[in-house]
Amino acid sequence: MRKMAEKQLGVPISKAVISVPAEFDERQRNYTIRAANLAGLDVLRVINEPTAAAMAYGLHKADVFSVLVVDLGGGTLDVSLLNKQGGMFLTRAMAGNNKLGGQDFNQRLLQYVEERVRQRHGALPSRKQDRHQLRQAVEQAKLSLTLQPSAVLRARLGHEAGGVLFEEVITRELFEQLNADLFQKILTPIEEVLREGRLDKREVDEIVLVGGSTRIPRIRQLIREFFGKEPNTSVDPDLAVVTGVAIQAGIMGGSWPLQVSAIEIPNRHLRKTNFN
């Protein structure tokens, strides 16, 4: 990664700020630092991913106290409750689901599409290439549905000479129905961090979204309805963590036009609650 960055920027890189999952203990953080040292990097600071995301949204310089970070990626869900005073962040509570993410939403749609193939052509796709084509088509349809109410799923099945072009219109409503129970599970760790943090949902100042799966309109709607206000969507959720890390590195290197820096208060007694 260091060599890739040096090639892209055209300058040598010797120092870094690194983000890690908030649940990492001291041993895991030390191993991360050692790995960076072996790559020739001097680690200026290790910060939690939720804190980095909050910095990307500019919350280190905003007048907020309680920040809830929802990180929903391809395979896992992580929810963190942060308290901020001045430039200091304290992680109050963590919860999540290590078996819930975008891949699970894809799988529900894939099962539906495979059944439609069986109904139309009399058999499920058996060739490895066909299943790969369907998975790619499902992923593309899911991405399209974040921006529009329907998408046409297309996949060529069978050998090219004697194959068929499978097409199916997928609506956002259908996608939401297929995943209704999975979407609802997102609220469970949110409720848990509020309970552990002894905070009413109305007292949360900012809701920060991280991870590509938070682009799904129904997920944003559920979060909005639960809190009674809009989550902060001003930053690309795929880039929130890395943007926050870059801001922290810029501040520490003196190249970022801010005097304030996010300092984390370690909470060694904190444990993540998992709902798998």
Image (cartoon, rainbow, N blue to C red):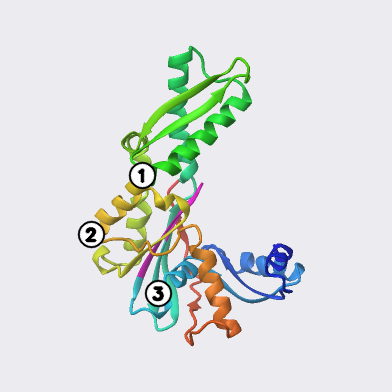
Q: Which residues are magenta?
A: 67-79
Q: Residues within 10 Å of mark 1 (few under 14, many from 20)?
A: some
Q: In this figure, which residue is indicated by the disc labeled 3?
A: 59
Please determine whether, in this image, residue 39 is positioned above or below residue 71.
below
Q: Residues within 10 Å of mark 3 (few under 14, many from 20)?
A: many
What secondary structure is the magenta-colored segment mainly? Answer: strand
User: What amino acid type should be assigned to the residue bearing mark 1?
Assistant: Phe
Question: Could you tell me which secondary element the residue under label 3 belongs to?
Answer: helix
Q: Position of residue 157 (x, y in %)?
A: 56, 22
- Dot 3 or dot 1: first in sequence order is 3
Please determine whether, in this image, residue 188 is positioned above or below residue 108.
below
**Between 211 and 153, which is closer to the camera in this rendering?**
153
User: What amino acid type should be assigned to the residue bearing mark 3?
Assistant: Leu
Question: Could you tell me which secondary element the residue under label 1 belongs to?
Answer: helix
Please determine whether, in this image, residue 117 is positioned above or below residue 210.
above
- Dot 2 or dot 3: first in sequence order is 3
Q: In this figure, which residue is indicated by the disc labeled 2?
A: 228
Relative to 59, is 137 on the left or the right? right
**Between 273 and 129, which is closer to the camera in this rendering?**
129
- Dot 2 or dot 1: first in sequence order is 1
Relative to 211, is 68 on the left or the right? left
Q: Residue furthest front?
A: 161
Q: Is residue 70 magenta?
A: yes
Which residue is at a point 50% across and 41% down the rendered structure image? 103
- Say the numbered circle drawn on residue 183: 1
